[in-house]
Protein backbone atom coordinates (compact mmCIF):
# COMPACT_ATOMS: atom_id res chain seq x y z
CA UNK A 1 0.00 0.00 0.00
CA UNK A 2 2.89 2.35 0.77
CA UNK A 3 4.03 2.05 -2.86
CA UNK A 4 0.79 3.64 -4.03
CA UNK A 5 2.02 6.99 -2.68
CA UNK A 6 5.75 6.58 -3.19
CA UNK A 7 5.93 5.80 -6.90
CA UNK A 8 5.85 8.32 -9.73
CA UNK A 9 3.62 6.09 -11.86
CA UNK A 10 0.90 6.03 -9.23
CA UNK A 11 1.09 9.76 -8.65
CA UNK A 12 0.57 10.26 -12.38
CA UNK A 13 -2.68 8.31 -11.96
CA UNK A 14 -3.73 10.22 -8.81
CA UNK A 15 -3.13 13.66 -10.32
CA UNK A 16 -4.48 12.87 -13.78
CA UNK A 17 -7.46 11.02 -12.35
CA UNK A 18 -8.28 13.85 -9.95
CA UNK A 19 -8.27 16.41 -12.76
CA UNK A 20 -10.54 14.25 -14.90
CA UNK A 21 -12.99 13.72 -12.03
CA UNK A 22 -12.83 17.44 -11.28
CA UNK A 23 -13.77 18.20 -14.88
CA UNK A 24 -16.71 15.81 -14.76
CA UNK A 25 -17.92 17.21 -11.44
CA UNK A 26 -17.72 20.80 -12.67
CA UNK A 27 -19.61 20.21 -15.90
CA UNK A 28 -22.12 17.64 -14.69
CA UNK A 29 -22.92 19.54 -11.49
CA UNK A 30 -25.90 21.60 -12.65
CA UNK A 31 -25.44 21.62 -16.41
CA UNK A 32 -26.51 18.15 -17.53
CA UNK A 33 -30.25 18.73 -17.03
CA UNK A 34 -30.18 22.07 -18.87
CA UNK A 35 -28.08 20.64 -21.70
CA UNK A 36 -30.48 17.73 -22.20
CA UNK A 37 -33.53 20.01 -22.15
CA UNK A 38 -32.02 22.38 -24.72
CA UNK A 39 -30.81 19.50 -26.87
CA UNK A 40 -34.28 17.95 -26.81
CA UNK A 41 -35.91 21.28 -27.72
CA UNK A 42 -33.66 21.86 -30.71
CA UNK A 43 -33.94 18.21 -31.79
CA UNK A 44 -37.73 18.43 -31.79
CA UNK A 45 -37.56 21.52 -34.01
CA UNK A 46 -35.16 19.76 -36.39
CA UNK A 47 -37.44 16.71 -36.57
CA UNK A 48 -40.50 18.86 -37.21
CA UNK A 49 -38.77 20.89 -39.93
CA UNK A 50 -37.45 17.72 -41.56
CA UNK A 51 -40.95 17.19 -42.96
CA UNK A 52 -40.08 19.82 -45.55
CA UNK A 53 -38.27 18.67 -48.73
CA UNK A 54 -35.38 21.02 -47.96
CA UNK A 55 -33.56 22.41 -44.91
CA UNK A 56 -35.65 25.37 -43.80
CA UNK A 57 -34.50 28.50 -41.96
CA UNK A 58 -35.91 27.11 -38.70
CA UNK A 59 -34.04 23.84 -39.32
CA UNK A 60 -30.73 25.66 -39.80
CA UNK A 61 -31.21 27.82 -36.71
CA UNK A 62 -32.07 24.84 -34.51
CA UNK A 63 -29.17 22.83 -35.92
CA UNK A 64 -26.74 25.71 -35.32
CA UNK A 65 -28.00 26.13 -31.77
CA UNK A 66 -27.66 22.40 -31.06
CA UNK A 67 -24.09 22.36 -32.39
CA UNK A 68 -23.25 25.24 -30.06
CA UNK A 69 -24.33 23.32 -26.97
CA UNK A 70 -20.76 23.01 -25.73
CA UNK A 71 -19.29 23.13 -22.26
CA UNK A 72 -16.56 25.35 -23.65
CA UNK A 73 -19.17 28.04 -24.44
CA UNK A 74 -20.53 28.22 -20.88
CA UNK A 75 -19.21 30.69 -18.32
CA UNK A 76 -17.34 27.91 -16.54
CA UNK A 77 -15.94 26.55 -19.79
CA UNK A 78 -14.67 29.95 -20.89
CA UNK A 79 -13.06 30.51 -17.48
CA UNK A 80 -11.28 27.16 -17.61
CA UNK A 81 -10.12 27.76 -21.19
CA UNK A 82 -8.58 31.04 -20.04
CA UNK A 83 -6.85 29.31 -17.14
CA UNK A 84 -5.45 26.47 -19.25
CA UNK A 85 -5.03 28.42 -22.49
CA UNK A 86 -1.76 29.06 -24.29
CA UNK A 87 -0.36 32.19 -25.99
CA UNK A 88 -2.14 33.08 -29.21
CA UNK A 89 -0.89 33.52 -32.74
CA UNK A 90 1.16 36.49 -33.94
CA UNK A 91 3.05 37.72 -36.98
CA UNK A 92 5.32 40.73 -36.53
CA UNK A 93 5.00 41.53 -32.84
CA UNK A 94 4.68 38.71 -30.26
CA UNK A 95 3.18 40.94 -27.55
CA UNK A 96 -0.46 40.66 -28.77
CA UNK A 97 -0.28 36.91 -28.23
CA UNK A 98 -0.18 37.64 -24.48
CA UNK A 99 -1.68 41.10 -23.98
CA UNK A 100 -3.90 43.50 -25.90
CA UNK A 101 -5.05 46.82 -24.39
CA UNK A 102 -8.46 48.41 -24.98
CA UNK A 103 -6.92 51.05 -27.21
CA UNK A 104 -5.04 48.43 -29.24
CA UNK A 105 -8.20 46.33 -29.55
CA UNK A 106 -10.17 49.35 -30.73
CA UNK A 107 -7.43 50.26 -33.21
CA UNK A 108 -7.55 46.75 -34.68
CA UNK A 109 -11.33 46.62 -34.88
CA UNK A 110 -12.26 50.13 -36.01
CA UNK A 111 -11.04 49.80 -39.65
CA UNK A 112 -13.34 46.80 -40.07
CA UNK A 113 -16.48 48.28 -38.48
CA UNK A 114 -17.88 49.63 -41.73
CA UNK A 115 -17.30 46.33 -43.54
CA UNK A 116 -18.96 44.46 -40.68
CA UNK A 117 -22.01 46.75 -40.68
CA UNK A 118 -22.29 46.36 -44.43
CA UNK A 119 -22.11 42.56 -44.18
CA UNK A 120 -24.68 42.59 -41.39
CA UNK A 121 -27.10 44.76 -43.38
CA UNK A 122 -26.63 42.54 -46.42
CA UNK A 123 -27.33 39.44 -44.34
CA UNK A 124 -30.51 40.95 -42.89
CA UNK A 125 -31.73 41.84 -46.38
CA UNK A 126 -30.97 38.39 -47.78
CA UNK A 127 -32.52 36.71 -44.74
CA UNK A 128 -35.72 38.71 -45.22
CA UNK A 129 -35.91 37.47 -48.80
CA UNK A 130 -35.18 33.91 -47.67
CA UNK A 131 -37.97 34.12 -45.07
CA UNK A 132 -40.42 35.23 -47.75
CA UNK A 133 -39.46 32.36 -50.05
CA UNK A 134 -39.46 29.85 -47.20
CA UNK A 135 -42.95 31.01 -46.12
CA UNK A 136 -44.31 30.90 -49.68
CA UNK A 137 -43.08 27.31 -50.11
CA UNK A 138 -44.61 26.30 -46.76
CA UNK A 139 -47.98 27.94 -47.58
CA UNK A 140 -48.07 25.90 -50.80
CA UNK A 141 -47.55 22.75 -48.74
CA UNK A 142 -44.13 22.30 -50.36
CA UNK A 143 -45.94 21.00 -53.44
CA UNK A 144 -44.78 23.79 -55.78
CA UNK A 145 -41.38 22.80 -57.18
CA UNK A 146 -40.63 26.33 -58.37
CA UNK A 147 -41.29 27.82 -54.91
CA UNK A 148 -39.22 25.08 -53.24
CA UNK A 149 -36.27 25.75 -55.54
CA UNK A 150 -36.51 29.49 -54.91
CA UNK A 151 -36.50 28.88 -51.14
CA UNK A 152 -33.47 26.57 -51.36
CA UNK A 153 -31.50 29.15 -53.34
CA UNK A 154 -32.48 32.04 -51.05
CA UNK A 155 -31.58 30.07 -47.92
CA UNK A 156 -28.21 29.08 -49.42
CA UNK A 157 -27.51 32.77 -50.14
CA UNK A 158 -28.46 33.64 -46.55
CA UNK A 159 -26.11 31.00 -45.14
CA UNK A 160 -23.24 32.38 -47.23
CA UNK A 161 -24.05 35.93 -46.09
CA UNK A 162 -24.20 34.75 -42.48
CA UNK A 163 -20.71 33.25 -42.75
CA UNK A 164 -19.43 36.49 -44.26
CA UNK A 165 -20.94 38.44 -41.36
CA UNK A 166 -19.37 36.13 -38.77
CA UNK A 167 -15.98 36.56 -40.43
CA UNK A 168 -16.37 40.35 -40.53
CA UNK A 169 -17.50 40.39 -36.88
CA UNK A 170 -14.29 38.70 -35.74
CA UNK A 171 -12.24 41.46 -37.33
CA UNK A 172 -14.45 44.30 -36.09
CA UNK A 173 -15.26 43.19 -32.55
CA UNK A 174 -11.74 42.76 -31.14
CA UNK A 175 -11.72 42.43 -27.36
CA UNK A 176 -8.93 43.41 -25.00
CA UNK A 177 -7.24 40.65 -23.01
CA UNK A 178 -4.36 39.95 -20.67
CA UNK A 179 -3.19 36.34 -20.55
CA UNK A 180 -0.33 36.95 -18.12
CA UNK A 181 -2.37 36.60 -14.87
CA UNK A 182 -3.94 33.42 -16.23
CA UNK A 183 -0.50 31.96 -17.02
CA UNK A 184 0.64 32.76 -13.48
CA UNK A 185 -2.48 31.04 -12.16
CA UNK A 186 -1.85 27.99 -14.34
CA UNK A 187 1.77 27.79 -13.17
CA UNK A 188 0.60 27.86 -9.54
CA UNK A 189 -2.08 25.24 -10.26
CA UNK A 190 0.30 22.78 -11.94
CA UNK A 191 3.14 23.53 -9.54
CA UNK A 192 0.99 22.83 -6.48
CA UNK A 193 -0.10 19.35 -7.59
CA UNK A 194 3.33 18.19 -8.71
CA UNK A 195 5.12 19.73 -5.73
CA UNK A 196 2.69 17.92 -3.43
CA UNK A 197 3.31 14.63 -5.23
CA UNK A 198 7.08 15.15 -5.08
CA UNK A 199 6.85 15.93 -1.34
CA UNK A 200 4.81 12.81 -0.52
CA UNK A 201 7.28 10.68 -2.51
CA UNK A 202 10.01 11.87 -0.13
CA UNK A 203 11.67 14.70 -2.05
CA UNK A 204 11.76 18.45 -1.57
CA UNK A 205 8.59 20.13 -2.78
CA UNK A 206 10.09 23.60 -2.35
CA UNK A 207 13.14 22.78 -4.50
CA UNK A 208 10.83 21.45 -7.19
CA UNK A 209 8.65 24.58 -7.06
CA UNK A 210 11.70 26.83 -7.43
CA UNK A 211 12.94 25.01 -10.53
CA UNK A 212 9.42 24.61 -11.94
CA UNK A 213 9.15 28.37 -12.38
CA UNK A 214 12.13 28.23 -14.80
CA UNK A 215 10.77 25.22 -16.71
CA UNK A 216 7.31 26.76 -17.04
CA UNK A 217 8.72 30.01 -18.45
CA UNK A 218 10.51 28.07 -21.19
CA UNK A 219 7.27 26.18 -21.90
CA UNK A 220 5.46 29.51 -22.34
CA UNK A 221 8.21 30.72 -24.67
CA UNK A 222 7.90 27.47 -26.67
CA UNK A 223 4.18 28.03 -27.18
CA UNK A 224 4.89 31.66 -28.04
CA UNK A 225 7.38 30.75 -30.78
CA UNK A 226 5.08 28.03 -32.13
CA UNK A 227 2.31 30.63 -32.52
CA UNK A 228 4.25 32.71 -35.05
CA UNK A 229 2.27 32.47 -38.30
CA UNK A 230 5.10 31.53 -40.70
CA UNK A 231 6.57 29.05 -38.21
CA UNK A 232 3.15 27.48 -37.64
CA UNK A 233 2.61 27.07 -41.38
CA UNK A 234 5.89 25.16 -41.55
CA UNK A 235 4.55 22.67 -39.02
CA UNK A 236 7.09 23.47 -36.29
CA UNK A 237 5.00 23.03 -33.15
CA UNK A 238 5.51 23.71 -29.47
CA UNK A 239 7.10 20.31 -28.84
CA UNK A 240 9.97 20.98 -31.23
CA UNK A 241 10.55 24.45 -29.79
CA UNK A 242 10.51 23.09 -26.23
CA UNK A 243 13.24 20.57 -27.00
CA UNK A 244 15.28 23.04 -29.07
CA UNK A 245 15.24 25.73 -26.38
CA UNK A 246 16.08 23.20 -23.69
CA UNK A 247 18.97 21.78 -25.71
CA UNK A 248 20.35 25.26 -26.45
CA UNK A 249 20.40 26.14 -22.75
CA UNK A 250 21.74 22.77 -21.64
CA UNK A 251 24.58 22.73 -24.16
CA UNK A 252 25.63 26.39 -23.96
CA UNK A 253 25.26 28.13 -20.60
CA UNK A 254 24.22 24.89 -18.93
CA UNK A 255 21.12 24.02 -16.93
CA UNK A 256 21.29 25.64 -13.46
CA UNK A 257 21.56 23.16 -10.61
CA UNK A 258 18.54 24.64 -8.83
CA UNK A 259 16.38 23.84 -11.90
CA UNK A 260 17.25 20.13 -12.07
CA UNK A 261 14.83 18.98 -9.30
CA UNK A 262 12.01 20.18 -11.57
CA UNK A 263 13.11 18.24 -14.67
CA UNK A 264 10.60 15.45 -14.10
CA UNK A 265 10.20 14.41 -17.73
CA UNK A 266 8.43 11.13 -17.15
CA UNK A 267 6.24 12.43 -14.31
CA UNK A 268 4.86 15.17 -16.57
CA UNK A 269 4.29 13.00 -19.60
CA UNK A 270 2.89 10.03 -17.67
CA UNK A 271 0.27 12.31 -16.13
CA UNK A 272 -0.44 13.67 -19.61
CA UNK A 273 -0.94 10.15 -20.91
CA UNK A 274 -3.51 9.43 -18.20
CA UNK A 275 -5.40 12.50 -19.44
CA UNK A 276 -5.00 11.27 -23.03
CA UNK A 277 -6.84 8.08 -22.08
CA UNK A 278 -10.04 10.09 -21.53
CA UNK A 279 -9.92 11.22 -25.17
CA UNK A 280 -9.84 7.66 -26.51
CA UNK A 281 -13.56 6.91 -26.61
CA UNK A 282 -14.31 3.30 -27.52
CA UNK A 283 -17.63 4.28 -29.12
CA UNK A 284 -15.80 6.32 -31.75
CA UNK A 285 -13.50 3.39 -32.43
CA UNK A 286 -16.52 1.19 -33.10
CA UNK A 287 -17.93 3.88 -35.44
CA UNK A 288 -15.07 3.39 -37.90
CA UNK A 289 -15.31 -0.35 -37.29
CA UNK A 290 -13.18 -3.17 -38.57
CA UNK A 291 -11.33 -1.31 -41.35
CA UNK A 292 -9.72 1.09 -38.87
CA UNK A 293 -8.93 -1.68 -36.40
CA UNK A 294 -7.16 -3.72 -39.09
CA UNK A 295 -5.16 -0.69 -40.23
CA UNK A 296 -4.08 0.22 -36.69
CA UNK A 297 -3.81 -3.11 -34.90
CA UNK A 298 -2.39 -5.38 -37.60
CA UNK A 299 0.15 -3.13 -39.29
CA UNK A 300 1.54 -1.56 -36.10
CA UNK A 301 2.82 -4.76 -34.39
CA UNK A 302 4.26 -6.01 -37.71
CA UNK A 303 6.19 -2.76 -38.21
CA UNK A 304 7.34 -2.68 -34.57
CA UNK A 305 8.70 -6.22 -34.57
CA UNK A 306 10.23 -5.94 -38.05
CA UNK A 307 11.94 -2.64 -37.25
CA UNK A 308 13.38 -4.01 -34.00
CA UNK A 309 14.64 -7.12 -35.81
CA UNK A 310 16.14 -4.96 -38.58
CA UNK A 311 17.96 -2.83 -36.03
CA UNK A 312 19.43 -5.83 -34.25
CA UNK A 313 20.22 -8.18 -37.13
CA UNK A 314 21.01 -5.82 -40.00
CA UNK A 315 22.14 -2.52 -38.49
CA UNK A 316 23.66 -4.20 -35.41
CA UNK A 317 22.56 -1.42 -33.05
CA UNK A 318 24.34 -2.12 -29.77
CA UNK A 319 21.64 -0.73 -27.47
CA UNK A 320 18.54 -2.88 -27.54
CA UNK A 321 16.65 -0.37 -25.43
CA UNK A 322 17.37 2.41 -27.95
CA UNK A 323 16.37 0.11 -30.79
CA UNK A 324 13.07 -0.78 -29.10
CA UNK A 325 12.24 2.80 -28.12
CA UNK A 326 12.76 4.10 -31.66
CA UNK A 327 10.76 1.19 -33.09
CA UNK A 328 7.81 1.87 -30.79
CA UNK A 329 8.02 5.63 -31.28
CA UNK A 330 7.88 5.27 -35.07
CA UNK A 331 5.32 2.47 -35.34
CA UNK A 332 2.75 3.27 -32.64
CA UNK A 333 2.14 6.95 -31.94
CA UNK A 334 5.32 8.90 -31.39
CA UNK A 335 6.27 10.43 -28.06
CA UNK A 336 3.54 8.78 -25.96
CA UNK A 337 4.54 5.29 -27.07
CA UNK A 338 8.24 6.15 -26.75
CA UNK A 339 7.83 7.16 -23.09
CA UNK A 340 5.76 4.09 -22.21
CA UNK A 341 8.17 1.76 -24.02
CA UNK A 342 11.26 3.44 -22.58
CA UNK A 343 9.84 2.90 -19.09
CA UNK A 344 9.08 -0.75 -19.88
CA UNK A 345 12.55 -1.59 -21.20
CA UNK A 346 14.45 0.84 -18.91
CA UNK A 347 15.91 2.98 -21.68
CA UNK A 348 18.07 5.93 -20.66
CA UNK A 349 16.90 9.56 -20.88
CA UNK A 350 19.39 10.18 -23.69
CA UNK A 351 17.93 7.29 -25.69
CA UNK A 352 14.42 8.60 -25.13
CA UNK A 353 15.53 12.07 -26.22
CA UNK A 354 17.03 10.70 -29.44
CA UNK A 355 13.86 8.75 -30.27
CA UNK A 356 11.64 11.76 -29.58
CA UNK A 357 13.91 14.05 -31.63
CA UNK A 358 13.72 11.77 -34.66
CA UNK A 359 9.95 11.59 -34.28
CA UNK A 360 9.68 15.40 -34.24
CA UNK A 361 11.70 15.80 -37.43
CA UNK A 362 9.87 13.14 -39.42
CA UNK A 363 6.45 14.24 -38.13
CA UNK A 364 7.04 17.85 -39.23
CA UNK A 365 8.03 16.68 -42.71
CA UNK A 366 5.26 14.10 -43.13
CA UNK A 367 2.40 16.35 -42.02
CA UNK A 368 3.25 18.71 -44.90
CA UNK A 369 4.41 16.28 -47.58
CA UNK A 370 1.75 13.57 -47.21
CA UNK A 371 -1.36 15.74 -47.82
CA UNK A 372 0.37 17.39 -50.79
CA UNK A 373 1.26 13.97 -52.27
CA UNK A 374 -2.26 12.60 -51.66
CA UNK A 375 -3.84 15.55 -53.47
CA UNK A 376 -1.27 15.38 -56.27
CA UNK A 377 -1.98 11.72 -57.12
CA UNK A 378 -5.74 12.12 -56.64
CA UNK A 379 -6.00 9.56 -53.84
CA UNK A 380 -9.54 9.10 -52.41
CA UNK A 381 -10.13 11.26 -49.35
CA UNK A 382 -10.95 8.40 -46.96
CA UNK A 383 -7.95 6.35 -48.10
CA UNK A 384 -5.71 9.38 -47.63
CA UNK A 385 -7.11 9.97 -44.16
CA UNK A 386 -6.56 6.34 -43.15
CA UNK A 387 -2.99 6.47 -44.49
CA UNK A 388 -2.23 9.65 -42.52
CA UNK A 389 -3.83 8.32 -39.33
CA UNK A 390 -1.80 5.13 -39.38
CA UNK A 391 1.61 6.66 -40.15
CA UNK A 392 2.07 10.20 -38.81
CA UNK A 393 3.12 9.99 -35.17
CA UNK A 394 1.62 12.87 -33.19
CA UNK A 395 -2.17 13.15 -32.84
CA UNK A 396 -2.08 16.91 -33.38
CA UNK A 397 -0.08 16.50 -36.57
CA UNK A 398 -2.54 13.83 -37.77
CA UNK A 399 -5.46 16.21 -37.27
CA UNK A 400 -3.65 19.04 -39.05
CA UNK A 401 -2.67 16.84 -42.00
CA UNK A 402 -6.13 15.29 -42.26
CA UNK A 403 -7.75 18.73 -42.30
CA UNK A 404 -5.84 19.53 -45.52
CA UNK A 405 -7.80 16.77 -47.29
CA UNK A 406 -11.31 17.40 -45.94
CA UNK A 407 -13.71 16.63 -43.10
CA UNK A 408 -14.05 12.92 -43.90
CA UNK A 409 -10.28 12.46 -44.07
CA UNK A 410 -9.89 14.35 -40.80
CA UNK A 411 -12.46 12.14 -39.06
CA UNK A 412 -10.97 8.88 -40.36
CA UNK A 413 -7.37 9.96 -39.65
CA UNK A 414 -8.10 11.08 -36.09
CA UNK A 415 -10.11 7.94 -35.29
CA UNK A 416 -7.46 5.57 -36.62
CA UNK A 417 -4.83 7.39 -34.58
CA UNK A 418 -7.13 7.03 -31.58
CA UNK A 419 -7.44 3.29 -32.26
CA UNK A 420 -3.66 3.08 -32.58
CA UNK A 421 -3.20 4.89 -29.27
CA UNK A 422 -5.01 2.03 -27.52
CA UNK A 423 -1.94 -0.08 -28.27
CA UNK A 424 0.25 2.03 -25.95
CA UNK A 425 -0.64 -0.09 -22.92
CA UNK A 426 -0.49 -3.39 -24.80
CA UNK A 427 2.89 -2.61 -26.37
CA UNK A 428 4.32 -1.45 -23.02
CA UNK A 429 3.22 -4.70 -21.37
CA UNK A 430 4.62 -6.81 -24.21
CA UNK A 431 7.96 -4.98 -24.12
CA UNK A 432 8.15 -5.39 -20.34
CA UNK A 433 7.60 -9.14 -20.65
CA UNK A 434 10.06 -9.49 -23.54
CA UNK A 435 12.90 -7.59 -21.87
CA UNK A 436 12.36 -9.29 -18.51
CA UNK A 437 12.25 -12.81 -19.93
CA UNK A 438 14.44 -12.70 -23.03
CA UNK A 439 16.78 -9.70 -23.06
CA UNK A 440 17.85 -9.32 -19.43
CA UNK A 441 17.38 -12.91 -18.35
CA UNK A 442 20.25 -15.29 -19.07
CA UNK A 443 17.92 -18.26 -18.99
CA UNK A 444 19.34 -19.65 -15.76
CA UNK A 445 16.53 -18.27 -13.63
CA UNK A 446 12.83 -18.28 -14.29
CA UNK A 447 11.32 -14.81 -14.43
CA UNK A 448 8.02 -14.69 -12.58
CA UNK A 449 4.97 -12.49 -12.76
CA UNK A 450 6.36 -10.34 -9.93
CA UNK A 451 9.32 -9.15 -11.99
CA UNK A 452 7.12 -8.45 -15.00
CA UNK A 453 4.69 -6.47 -12.82
CA UNK A 454 7.60 -4.55 -11.29
CA UNK A 455 8.78 -3.53 -14.76
CA UNK A 456 5.32 -2.79 -16.17
CA UNK A 457 4.61 0.99 -16.36
CA UNK A 458 1.80 1.37 -13.80
CA UNK A 459 0.57 4.68 -15.23
CA UNK A 460 -0.74 2.68 -18.20
CA UNK A 461 -3.47 1.45 -15.84
CA UNK A 462 -4.58 5.05 -15.43
CA UNK A 463 -4.51 5.51 -19.20
CA UNK A 464 -6.72 2.44 -19.74
CA UNK A 465 -8.98 3.27 -16.80
CA UNK A 466 -9.62 6.80 -18.06
CA UNK A 467 -10.47 5.46 -21.51
CA UNK A 468 -12.95 2.91 -20.12
CA UNK A 469 -14.61 5.31 -17.66
CA UNK A 470 -15.04 8.15 -20.16
CA UNK A 471 -16.21 5.74 -22.84
CA UNK A 472 -18.94 4.46 -20.51
CA UNK A 473 -19.97 7.98 -19.54
CA UNK A 474 -20.03 8.95 -23.21
CA UNK A 475 -22.14 5.91 -24.04
CA UNK A 476 -24.77 6.24 -21.32
CA UNK A 477 -25.07 9.97 -20.70
CA UNK A 478 -26.93 10.72 -23.95
CA UNK A 479 -26.03 12.79 -26.99
CA UNK A 480 -26.32 16.21 -25.37
CA UNK A 481 -24.29 15.46 -22.26
CA UNK A 482 -21.73 13.23 -23.95
CA UNK A 483 -20.83 15.78 -26.61
CA UNK A 484 -21.48 19.03 -24.80
CA UNK A 485 -20.28 18.13 -21.31
CA UNK A 486 -17.73 15.36 -21.89
CA UNK A 487 -16.01 16.04 -25.23
CA UNK A 488 -16.53 19.82 -25.20
CA UNK A 489 -16.52 20.20 -21.43
CA UNK A 490 -14.41 18.06 -19.13
CA UNK A 491 -12.07 17.20 -22.02
CA UNK A 492 -12.25 20.22 -24.30
CA UNK A 493 -12.11 22.93 -21.63
CA UNK A 494 -9.82 21.26 -19.09
CA UNK A 495 -7.98 17.98 -19.60
CA UNK A 496 -6.97 18.43 -23.25
CA UNK A 497 -5.32 21.79 -22.60
CA UNK A 498 -3.65 20.51 -19.44
CA UNK A 499 -2.29 17.54 -21.39
CA UNK A 500 -0.73 19.92 -23.91
CA UNK A 501 1.00 21.85 -21.14
CA UNK A 502 2.27 18.67 -19.49
CA UNK A 503 3.73 17.42 -22.76
CA UNK A 504 5.36 20.81 -23.32
CA UNK A 505 6.89 20.74 -19.81
CA UNK A 506 8.15 17.22 -20.49
CA UNK A 507 9.82 18.28 -23.75
CA UNK A 508 11.45 21.26 -22.03
CA UNK A 509 12.73 18.88 -19.34
CA UNK A 510 14.12 16.53 -22.00
CA UNK A 511 16.05 19.37 -23.61
CA UNK A 512 17.37 20.80 -20.34
CA UNK A 513 18.57 17.41 -19.13
CA UNK A 514 20.25 16.33 -22.39
CA UNK A 515 23.92 16.82 -23.21
CA UNK A 516 25.07 16.49 -26.82
CA UNK A 517 28.28 14.79 -25.71
CA UNK A 518 26.30 12.01 -24.05
CA UNK A 519 23.81 11.85 -26.92
CA UNK A 520 26.54 11.62 -29.56
CA UNK A 521 27.57 8.07 -28.64
CA UNK A 522 24.05 6.82 -29.38
CA UNK A 523 24.20 8.25 -32.88
CA UNK A 524 27.31 6.44 -34.11
CA UNK A 525 27.22 5.76 -37.85
CA UNK A 526 23.79 7.36 -38.16
CA UNK A 527 22.19 4.00 -37.40
CA UNK A 528 19.21 5.39 -35.45
CA UNK A 529 18.35 7.67 -38.39
CA UNK A 530 18.62 4.77 -40.84
CA UNK A 531 16.47 2.63 -38.55
CA UNK A 532 13.75 5.28 -38.31
CA UNK A 533 13.78 5.97 -42.05
CA UNK A 534 13.57 2.31 -43.04
CA UNK A 535 10.93 1.55 -40.43
CA UNK A 536 8.78 4.49 -41.47
CA UNK A 537 9.11 3.51 -45.14
CA UNK A 538 7.81 0.03 -44.29
CA UNK A 539 5.06 1.60 -42.20
CA UNK A 540 3.96 3.86 -45.07
CA UNK A 541 3.80 0.98 -47.57
CA UNK A 542 1.99 -1.53 -45.32
CA UNK A 543 -0.49 1.03 -43.97
CA UNK A 544 -1.47 2.23 -47.44
CA UNK A 545 -1.90 -1.36 -48.65
CA UNK A 546 -3.94 -2.40 -45.60
CA UNK A 547 -6.09 0.74 -45.75
CA UNK A 548 -6.92 0.14 -49.42
CA UNK A 549 -7.75 -3.54 -48.85
CA UNK A 550 -9.91 -2.94 -45.79
CA UNK A 551 -11.73 0.26 -46.78
CA UNK A 552 -12.25 -0.51 -50.49
CA UNK A 553 -12.12 -4.29 -51.01
CA UNK A 554 -13.24 -5.98 -47.77
CA UNK A 555 -15.56 -3.37 -46.18
CA UNK A 556 -16.63 -0.99 -48.98
CA UNK A 557 -20.11 -0.57 -47.45
CA UNK A 558 -18.55 0.96 -44.32
CA UNK A 559 -16.53 3.36 -46.47
CA UNK A 560 -19.69 4.45 -48.31
CA UNK A 561 -21.43 5.22 -45.00
CA UNK A 562 -18.66 7.50 -43.69
Image (tube, rainbow, N blue to C red):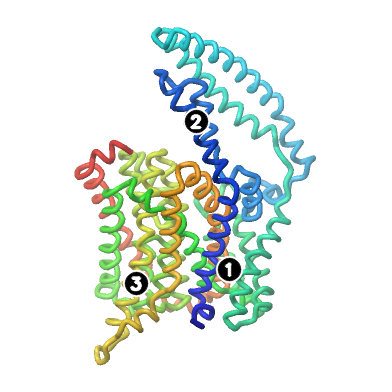
First of labels 1, 2 by sequence position: 2
The residue at the far bottom in this view is 444
Which residue is labeled 2 in the image?
A: 63
User: 80 left or right of 392?
Assistant: right
Residue under label 3: 429
Q: CA distance from mark 3 to mark 1?
A: 31 Å
Q: Is residue 364 visible?
A: no
Q: Earlier in the sequence, mark 3 or mark 1?
A: 1
Front tag of 3 and 1 = 3
Q: In the picture shown, does residue 237 fall above or below 75?
A: below
**Disc 3 on helix, strand or loop?**
helix
Figure quadrant of residue 371: top left
Q: Which percent across, then down, holds residue 128?
A: 59, 14
Q: Nearer the viewer, residue 124 or 197?
A: 197
Q: Nearer the viewer, residue 556 or 352?
A: 556
Query: Can residue 443 be spotted in the picture?
Result: yes
How far is disc 1 from disc 2 in space, using C-alphas? Answer: 47 Å
Q: Residue at x 65, y 64 (%)?
A: 189
Going 26% across and 53% down the picture, which residue do you hit? 294
Q: Earlier in the sequence, mark 2 or mark 3?
A: 2
Task: Name the front one of labels 2 and 3.
Answer: 2
When the figure is inspected, residue 471 is found, relative to residue 39, above or below; the finding is below
The image position of residue 548, as x and y in percent, is 24, 46
Total numbered labels placed on residues in the image: 3
Q: Position of residue 451 (x, y in %)?
A: 35, 84
Q: CA distance from mark 2 to mark 3?
A: 45 Å
Residue at far right of view: 103
Q: Which mark is residue 84?
A: none
Res. 246 mark: 1
Q: Nearer the viewer, mark 1 or mark 2?
A: 2
Amino acid sequence: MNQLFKREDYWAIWIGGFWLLLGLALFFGNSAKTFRADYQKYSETIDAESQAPYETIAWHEANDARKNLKGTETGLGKWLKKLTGKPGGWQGNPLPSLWLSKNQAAAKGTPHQEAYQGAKNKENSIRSLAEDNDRNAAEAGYQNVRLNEAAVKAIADWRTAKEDTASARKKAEVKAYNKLPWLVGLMAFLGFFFAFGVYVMGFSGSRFAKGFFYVFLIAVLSYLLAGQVEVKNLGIGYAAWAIILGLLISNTIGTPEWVKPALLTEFFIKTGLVLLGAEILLGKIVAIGLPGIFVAWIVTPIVLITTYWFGQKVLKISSKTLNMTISADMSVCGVSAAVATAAACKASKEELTLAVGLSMVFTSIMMIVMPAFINWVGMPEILGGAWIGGTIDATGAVVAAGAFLGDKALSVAATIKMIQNVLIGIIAFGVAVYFATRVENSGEARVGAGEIWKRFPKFILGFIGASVVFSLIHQFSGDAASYGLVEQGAIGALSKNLRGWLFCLAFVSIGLSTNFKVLKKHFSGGKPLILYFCGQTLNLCLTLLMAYIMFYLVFPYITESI
